Image: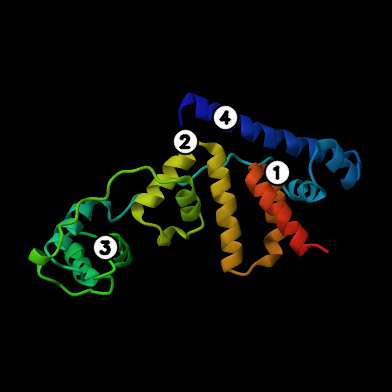
Amino acid sequence: MNKRQEEKSERLHQEQVQRYHQIHDLHAKKVDTANIARQVGVSRRTVYYYLKMTEPPARTRINRQYKPVIAPYKEYLIKRWNEGCRNAQQVHRELKEQGYTGSDQPIVRYFAQFRTKKDARKFKQIDPQTATPVKAPPKRPPTASQVAHWITFKEDQRLDWQQQYLIQLCEADPQIAQTYELIQSFTTMLRERKGEGLDTWLAQVEAQGVSELKSFAQGLKKITMP
């Protein structure tokens, strides 16, 4: 992060730490939950969320260790496609001989962006002279709606460059990093059917989330609460 981004991240974190101490100090003075919520300006659910913490919240940080395994082999993938090979499993075997350690799924996803409706289901080799050569994907910035869609994916469902783009966004803006983590928590909760974690998630959104997520959470409350 640059200096400005670091300052923004620090400011957001300090607000959360201050809220933590306010709530715990009032609780230590035997102030009831409703009054704590009123004085601090949060919901009672958020008060309960902070009271469960044994120490102030840590700063949100994105995992920077992600390194796309397939990245060094993309030129070879394009070369093989242009040579007429559409079989991801075949190319996977070839890459393993070159030191590739990943599965064949990133190759399948990488090839998918080159397929047309005409050959969408073809996985065998074709005559390269009858195929239009593929160039590397243009480096155009994705739209906000595209990025929002990627965030709802599991990490292994994203293309390598999509994952890298999200990491760069999260490193550049702490609010995006927080939003990323909250959305990932919510989608994981849905996939694994862990509805018992909804109250905690709603409290996290109120304590940390951006206005759009807070509006979404308010809508959920109306649906799930009598």
- Return the disc, 2 or 3, that comes first in the chain's sequence: 3
Q: Which residue is mark 3?
A: 111
Q: Which residue is mark 1?
A: 207
> Quick one: SS at disc 1?
helix
Q: Which circle marks residue 172 in the picture? A: 2
Which residue sits at x=39%, y=51%? Answer: 162
Q: Which residue is mark 4?
A: 8
> Quick one: SS at disc 3?
helix
| Residue 4 percent across, percent down from the top left | 51, 25
- Return the disc, 2 or 4, that comes first in the chain's sequence: 4
Amino acid type shown at disc 1: Ala
Circles 2 and 4 in contact, beta carbons < 8 Å? no
| Residue 100 percent across, percent down from the top left | 24, 60
> Quick one: SS at disc 4?
helix
- Return the disc, 2 or 1, that comes first in the chain's sequence: 2
Q: Quadrant of the C terminus?
A: bottom right
- Return the disc, 3 or 4, that comes first in the chain's sequence: 4
| Residue 211 percent across, percent down from the top left | 66, 42
Quarter-of-image position of residue 7: top right
